[in-house]
Image (spheres, coloured by chain):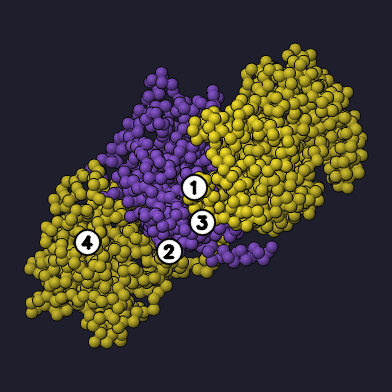
Amino acid sequence: MVSQTERQLLWNPRGENRFVVGGLSQITLYEWSPGEPAIRHVTSFQDLSSMKCFSWSPDPSIDDLLAIGMNNGRVDLVRLESTRSGREHLQGRGPHVTLPPKVARACISIAFCPTAPQYLAVGLDKARGDASLVIWDIHSATSVLAPHTRSPSASSASHIVAPPPSPVRPLHALPSPTRPYHPIPRTDLGPRTDSRIVQAHAPTESVHSLTWMPQSTQLLAASISHRFLRLFDLRSSSPAIAHVAGRVHSIATDPFDQYRLAAAVDGVVTLWDARKLPTPLLTFSPRDVLADGARSPNASTLGVVELEFSSVRRGMLATLEREASHVQLWNTLRTEAMDSAQERPRSRDIASQSGKPTKLSWSNPTSMLPWSASTGNQSGLNESSSPIPSAPYNLVLSDTRKTKRFRAPLASFALMPSARAHPLTSSLMVVSKDGDLETTSVHDTPMHAPWSARGTLSVAAGTSYRTFSGVPAGDVPSDPWTVVPSVVAPSLHDTDLNRFDGTSPSRRDDLARGRSRTAPGALAPLFGRGDEDGFPALNSPSAKPSPRMKHAHLQASSKKPSKEGTASPLYRSLPGSTAASPHLKANIELPVPSNPSSRASPSPTSTSRRHIGTSKPQKDKETSRARSTGRARRAVDRIQGVVDDDISMVMRRRVCLGYGLSNPSHNATLFRNGPDDETDKSLVETWIWIDLARHILEGPASRSNGYNISNQGLLGIWEGFPSSLPSAAPSAMSSPASRGLLLDPLTLSDADGAKALSRSRSRRSRPREKQEPPSEFVSELLTLGAHRQMDPPLDSAWTGMPTSRPVQRRFALQLCGWRSKDEYFDATIDQWESEGKQSRAACWLVFLGQHSKAVDLLMRSKDESHKMMSGTLVSLTPSSVAKSPELKRQYEKLIMRLEDPYLRAMLTYLALDEWADVLDEDSLPLRERLAIALQFLDDEALSVYLRRIAESSRTHGDIVGIIVTGLTTAGLDLLQSYVDRTGDVQTAAILGAYVHPHQLKDARVERWLDAYRDLLDGWKLFHHRSQFDIERGQILQELILSGSGEPIQLMQRQILVRCNYCNKVISAPQGISGKRATACPFCNRPLPRCSVCLMNLSIVPDSVRDNQLSHHNAALRDTIDDAIVFCQTCRHGGHAAHILEWFYGEAGARSHGVCAVADCDHRCADEF
Amino acid sequence: MQTGLIQNAHNDLVTDAAYDFYGLRLATCSLDQRIKVWQLDENEGTWNATSDWKAHDAAVAKVCWAHPEFGSIIASGSFDRTIKIWEETTADADQPQVNGNAASTSSNSRWVERFVNSDAKGSVRAVEFAPHHFGLKLATIASDNFLRVYECLEAPSLTTWQVADEIDVPALPSTSSASASHTHTLAVATPTQTTSSIDGPATASLVASALQQHQNAPTSRPAIGNREADGGWCLSWCKERYWGEVIAASCGVKGVVKIIQLSPSRRPTTLLTLDPSPSTDLSASMNSSHSADHDGAVASSITSVAWAPSCGRSYHLVATGGRDGHVRIWKLKPSAHDDDRADGAEEGRWTGSIVADFDHHKSAVGRVEWNITGTVLSSAGNDGRVRLWKATSGNIWRPAGHISVEQAEEQQKEGDVDMDEGNGAD
């Protein structure tokens, strides 16, 4: 071992949980095992002022035997435990054995032989005429030190019973007690020599560092006189020697490879195969770590002072640089050598370092070359009891890691052994120059966490994987055609606000149940939760996104309809879930999405710090372990939550529940379980609107005279667009061509808009000078309205508001699902009241000026607050006196504190006289706000409002803005920003499929469709993808049939029949249908014969078949009769009916085994 | 509880794992030089090993699956400097080169070595099949800093692969077309504006070459053998076909990612260079605990790059993980979208900006990987943790949870208990 005046840390050579720290005149024994919070001080030796070096015996019978080399060359063998009770001085009564030097000089290095602990190698300083490397046989000494366990006759370790092993697994390369070893032959060293000396070498040199090769009693590596690394083969009394020149600091051997030898040579780490000295396998220096994170390059010039091979990782080496405050770990990988032709030394390897002795062949990067017998000892080394032939190999320095930076420069370190075969970390014990002991762990396993198409995340942990599956086991999605659509009758006034006021629990419960009935086995309650708005599942254990919890939450919240009691007791009882989400003004309390990193559990790197000489246990081991287990479970749940709630898995669940093109109203029902999610609300609104719009706008009636009103949004309807551009939407945002139609400059800021909006009802409309939409457009709308049996145009009598575009207003209002006739409205008000939505009914009554009705309605309510509100309402009616500023301020405060959005809107309207604030009330659904705007804003303000909504939806990617933009280019812009924000390509693809490519050819829609179809394929939802394609085709087909779309072939025919002679496609021609069907229509040569009936096969041209199918009752004919089948192996075949009969007979039983062709014994029917 | 555990997948540490297109099979590789293929039991949710063979003469660094339209194909890259193509065959007797299989496998499938290539002069660190639109192509990157793209010439036999491109990544000039900065997207100068546009990249490349010289100078690293400890070699394909064959690759110790456009007619060009170095300084000054170490200002190598499936977004996301401990997410805009969306992308006017930069790992990041929609990023660091990152609704990337390898493994004992509890509660 290295001589050192500084502290040195030495781990127990048998891998037990003990280590010694020596230096500065004392040696201390400590005990520490992983999981323990404190390092336990066992015993110590004091006053070793002349100590130079020490070594720990691997002898299992005396586990505390230490050899201490002194300044005067003496080596003392002592037992650490002997001073435990008495703290005697070393030279006191404690048993010890002294090995005296022949010539007094410092003992610099000392090493026990790991295989045969009776051999001790001692390296001494230079002395004239005397050998400096002495091998002692200390067998007699150990029997003195441990007389009770040793019988004098026991000459080998074979009788020794190993002490009960510590929890730590013994090292790989530890000497097994029964392992035979070759005794070292005794050299004749002269008469005056101590009889215990076996061999002595290296005369007139100094030996600075000593290491026995593992599993060997013959090979001893030593650093000689700061000039050589010498490998002694001790089997003969005049040992064979191989040596390498260089200033060697520290030598290490690899427990995994008995021939691996590493040394710090001139500050550079060099690795050899001991059989192939002196050619190094690999050299590297701290400079090779320059790009591993930024670091000061200066520190790396000091050189490596200590190195050690890991006993838990194959090929891992730890090094400590001078003055460094961290330990560097290096991974080397052994690769079998390839043929030398591929070995081209790279340029930077060729460089030789100046001042290097020429003996080292630096230019050869590998050890491929046969070892040159320059010292003549090759054979001796290679014959060393090695059963393994030394195959040529390379070493690759593959990776590096470093420990954390300790507070002070380190004096020494030791890699700890591990009880596990492949632990997740490498643990180290370090001692700083100040004497602080500290442990650290380095995660040095290659880590990765791949994702699968099914959303499964795997986390590599050492040799194992933890998988978080996105698709639960046994989840077999039902086929798309088996999903029963839950049809919601599109009640026009009903925008389903019960999600907001939480007053209609029974219906929601029904919905949930009905939905889960439609898709048994799917994860119904998980559906549509938390896909983008933060990470609701992550904030606390209470938000654990297991289906059970969500279901419970659903039921709990729906069973408690009253305003105060809506918080689910499940959540309330748990910590960290009390604050309400800021987004939700509704009274359902939900756990707040909080930053999960703030709840990050502390790093598991067990770090216990202790000053030498003190010992106080700090933590209770049990509690810390229990806590970490709880943490682990929580972390696993969290990760699973992220996996489950990601949009990819949400999309998969949606498609399994029937989210698709065919039924927009069914789509709308799929989101109702996520009342906490803004985007889900938007999606519900969007799909309700799409459903409405498709009822009103679809069909040929919406496309005539060059106007294509289908897929328009409110903005398009309101502002109109020129004819003959059927697919170019009058997007105010993106289409400059339609600028002429715009009523106001685009640059209108929000403030201006607000001003225009404010109290517009009371203002008289100014005379308009701006261009109105073309009258043909208006008449188109009228025609379509009549076709759809709409209400008559909205006139000013209804709201008392003049408008120059009553047709558009009416049309747009109906597109919002809003009927304008009084009788409808009265019925709706009654319905709301009976459903318990008094506030909504009252709000609308106030908007319509029917204050007394509103007051009556609120008074009828059972809710106290509604009754109170009726008083407020009376005091605010227009007949009252003008409101003072104080009153306004008070109402502003009151409005801010109200929870019910309708009451807020009502008060805002009454107290502040502001439509703008009412229309900015985000908790009202956009569709309802648009209905308000369409009825109560004047033309100019309405234009501004619609465009403002369109623009802000596009900026924020709020999909509900589709109502305003429609599925136009502006709508696709909106969808794009929605996809950018949420990743929900599914919704974008479905919506885009309505218009692409027949009305609006857009590369973005193509991308969405491709991406979505790829996703479906990746989930193996082939049937769903096919269904999606079929539905797209149906939309297309309808358009083509109605003559408004060009025929587009979505899918090419995949298999063609070609003539054997002329190589033309037989079924292709249209005009040659009159010819014989059994011959090629081009060359008239006959087609092949059926192998059963020997008739020529006939190919019916497509056109003929299509005609037949359309004229006759196609269902009655089995197309298999016409089919032609071939065996794919023997290429024989014929009419399907004949072939089937041949193989299976009439009854379906197997009649023939082989082909019907002579000489062919292929068993066609057995193939697949 | 939907988590599962594959225990002791290999006899040594695992190095990489890849799912097939459907996520039903998992190929894992390890330091023990073997590749294993696992099959998911969809009903039980368990993974069962179906094949296990010694694939290389050294640790296997990376595996990947080809798109299923080409068959059941795995490519592997190893520290033995080879890449190999493996195909699963159902035939048994007439395959002479059967490379060994676990005797315990129940299925009669064999993985047959179809192709071996040892062009690389260093260990092959990454292999990845191209998106299937481009045919059966494989991109590899080795520690000799060469990005090699192989194309299968005979798809049925899989035995003939030709080098389609061989790119010395550090030497590939960064074209003046675009340069990314951490703060803002630099406007792309037209070629006529000579002075301003040439200035930036020119100086940058000078600095880069100087840096390279400094680091690769023979005198500064005198040593023997393959020393690849502190480098990073990684690549990732752009998953969509609309922009042609585009690869993000990073090599060696330079710490930049190059977005490389491959085209059959032209030489490969660099569309964009993602260089986070300015922000490294920025973060260094902010990160007080490590500020002392940053005075060297040496670039940290990129260990992993991952191109997110774009999933219909108008931009691309590329995540990088580096030895400096940073996980960065770059937002790449293919081209100016306003003019023409369809075909404006060929002209390499790509721009990039960093949208997220996390140093939570506090130590080198080993791997970054995207989920299928590009909405969740996983990163694994030397802090022993796998961290997830996710964008909030405001498109701000946030940490979304993390798990340590101990926690990932620890649950093996309590997992069953937990499941029982769950069943009982129901």
* Badge 1 amino acid: Cys
Query: Which quadrant holds residue A1151?
Result: bottom right
Distance, label 1 to label 3, CA atoms, is: 34 Å
Label 4: element kind: helix
Question: Circle 2 is placed at which residue position?
Answer: B103
* Image disc number at residue B39: 3
Chain letter behind tag 1: A
**Callout 4 touching callout 1 (CB < 8 Å):** no
Amino acid type shown at disc 4: Ala
Are marks 4 and 1 in one subunit?
yes
Q: At label 3, which amino acid type do we have? A: Gln
Q: Quadrant of residue A1056?
A: top right
The residue positioned 62% from the left and 66% from the top of the image is: B420
Q: CA distance from mark 3 to mark 4?
A: 44 Å
Tally the marks: 4
Q: Residue at x 57, y 60 (%)?
A: A633
**Residue visible at 62% across and 32% down in the picture:** A1102
Q: Which residue is mark 1?
A: A1130
Of badges 4 and 1, nearer the viewer stands: 1
Frontmost of labels 3 and 2 is: 2
**Nearest to viewer (mark 1 / mark 3):** 1
- Distance from Cα at disc 4 to Cα at disc 2: 37 Å
Q: Residues within 10 Å of mark 2 (few under 14, many from 20)?
A: few
Residue holding disc 4: A274
Q: Is residue A622 left or right of residue A389?
A: right
- Return the chain for callout 2: B
**Is the C-beta separation of discs 1 and 2 under 8 Å?**
no
Residue A481 appears at what percent x and percent y? Answer: 69, 45
Can the viewer see residue A851 in this picture? no
- Whole-percent x, y for residue A138 in the image: 21, 78
Which chain corresponds to the colour purple? Answer: B
